[in-house]
Image (cartoon, helix red, strand yellow):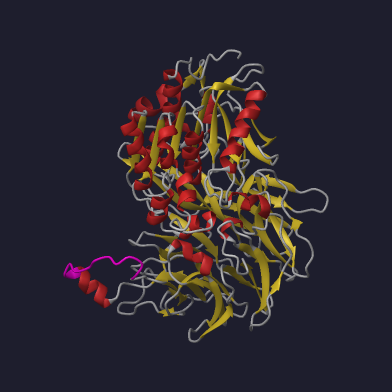
Amino acid sequence: MKRKIPGFLLLVFVLPGLCLMGREVWTAEKILLCNEPYSTVLSPDGQWVAYTITSSIIEEEKSGRITHIWISAVDGSRTYQLTRGGNSCYGPAWSPDGKWVAFSTDRSGSSNIWLISPGCGEAVQLTDEKQGVSTYKWSPDGKYIAFLMPDPPSGAEREAARIKVDPIIVDTGWHYSHIYKIRINNEKFFRGGPGGAVFSKSAPPGRRRQVLKVTSGDFDVYHFDWSPDGKNIVFAHQPTPQGSQWRHSDISIVSAQGGKIMPLVRYPGMDNSPLYSPDGSTVAFVSVRGNQSWGRDFRICLVPAKGGEVTVLPRTYDSLPGNIEGTIRAWSKDGSKIYYEEDIGTDNQLFALPVNGGPYIQVTRKPGWKGSYSIHADGSFVVYVGCDFEQPDEVFVEYVSKKKNKWRKISNANAQLPALPFAPSEVIRWKSFDGLEIEGILTYPLDYEKGKRYPLILEFHGGPTGAFYRAFTAYMWNKNQLFAAKGFAVLQVNVRGSSGRGKTFRFGNLRDWGGGDVKDGLAGVDYLIEKGLADPGRLGVHGWSYGGYLTGMTISRTQRFKAAVIGAGSTDLVSGTANTQSPGILVNFMGCEWWECEQLWHDRSPSSHVGDITTPTLLIYGKHDRDLPPHTGRILYRALKRKGIKTRMVIYPRSGHWVYEPKLHIDFLNRLLGWFTDNFLASGGQGPHGMGDR
């Protein structure tokens, strides 16, 4: 779908960077043309794939993102859009007989479940809950859908709000999410039988659709699965909805009719992602087995569904099955293995772990980042969203073979992208200060010539448990082509603490935030200077979240960078801990409370070293960020301002931890690029282009 670019946007955003030596190149506005497919799910017969595509809306008075559901044939023969309209539609879920697709949308004012025939037609609303519903799953017989929903405000809370005596008492008044279910195939919802039902537009007058609450209590449910016979539901739950509480989650079982809850797994720390085996006798789950570290050391475990001894399966490649969420995908049809995804270097792949204790098996082989896996029942092929340096996100089918896998693109989510030149990217490796091998992604300037030196941007990723991947380099969160078109080289570094390199590497930043990880990045810069690519007089650094923090620490340790951009980064660790929704993360990584080792926390806070900072610094935050709100950066901003260092702080409205709103994101990209370009010029050089031999 091509979207018309309004004239005023062409003037403000596109024309300033439209041409490079007479050619069209990637600009901020063109990057926002990229669509995002996700949420792939195979139909029960394995012939069709439902998925979502999210697009940007950029019009004169509009700036937003909209998501709709599409369907493609597995053989690539047909693709069509299933849902339409001005409200986004998410989370497609096929009914067990393949005759209906459930999805969520806020068409009614809050997020509720709707049903539609995969052959198109009119959708019908199933749930009508003011609080909004989230995760949902069909029962194995297709007669029910179970879903999660937060408790509504109590009568006392509503009355307090009415009379304006409703103070907010921190860490109290939780509205827990619980499991509910709703019946599908009865006369209240449609006329006719399940095989060819015609939906009524609404329930009969005076008859509210029957919703049963399955779980109750002072705990928050965030993951669940039906037993194969539909009689029970296994679920993961945590003490409160607070972000850090995943580290204290457990697993229980309840009858699908509600009632008494049977504890199943009560390890200290995280127990997550329970899934019944095909015969219902066993529950697989991901656990830290008592280790509550934010660095994460996950293992896939098995437990009898009726309770009993837990079996811990062998380690996976990265000791992080399911990545940082710890979510396993599925059991194989015969119950012999469990599918999960995991990072491996700069790739993400699907693996299978045998339940008999055998070693893990790599299932997918296509290079690049992948996600949203859906596995065919017999394991012969896998569907996912995948991308690579010059391949935008699309839906792929990968056929599994012992000799050589084959894959096919079946979506056209980004067929509308302009054919613009790409600067090449590659994975490189170097040795850090202590001999540890570090990996990163280098994107060359668009007109790179060997033997010339170029300005270099060093980028740190967030997390800290995360990584840079072989991903599309002209995407809204991957700005490499934008920089390359202006003559910059970009080094995205996977410092110690990153995923994809094993547990030991991932735990390498414990009690050492802003230490070895910063040195890993600096060693990468030195490596590219030694190789003759990077100009030592034209260095910039930036990052988002943990990467923003590392940016602050980098400019506090060295004055070699001419410009820096801190995005959503904590510049004072004590303030950051006090104001985040996950207060335990820093305590865990630092190994102590701030008052127990004040010097360590002080030394690892960028704001503590203002006297050593000379780098012009731009700080960027989302106004409604609950992870790292703006005042976590204002400490450094005010200090730099008073010291006379060139600095600016930008706070984006209607934004949380990420700036998703398209026009604001265009502003962010142009502001980011402009900060480096202007400060490189201001430092006395020629700017990104025209750099000669050094």
Magenta-drawn stretch, dominant element (helix, strand or loop): loop
Q: Residue 230: where, in percent of width, then height?
A: 58, 79
Q: Which of 204 and 482 is in front in this view?
A: 482
Quadrant in the picture for residue 433: top right
In the image, residue 464 sits, relative to residue 492, either above or below, namely: below
The residue segment tinted magenta is 162-172
- Using the rendered image of the protein, determine whether residue 4 is visible from the camera's viewpoint: no
* 508 displayed left or right of 616: right
* 417 displayed left or right of 123: right
Q: Residue 37: where, in percent of width, then height?
A: 54, 48
Residue at image location 42% in from the left, 42% down from the top: 608
In the image, residue 131 sits, relative to residue 602, either above or below, namely: below
Residue 568 forms part of the magenta stretch: no
Q: Residue 334: where, in percent of width, then height?
A: 74, 71
Quadrant placement of the C terminus: top right
In the image, residue 470 sits, relative to residue 196, either above or below, namely: above
* 500 displayed left or right of 406: left
- Using the rendered image of the protein, determine whether residue 528 is visible from the camera's viewpoint: yes
Residue 170 forms part of the magenta stretch: yes
Q: Residue 651: where, in percent of width, then height?
A: 34, 41
How many numbered marks, from 0 up? 0
Q: Residue furthest left?
A: 163
* 361 displayed left or right of 412: right
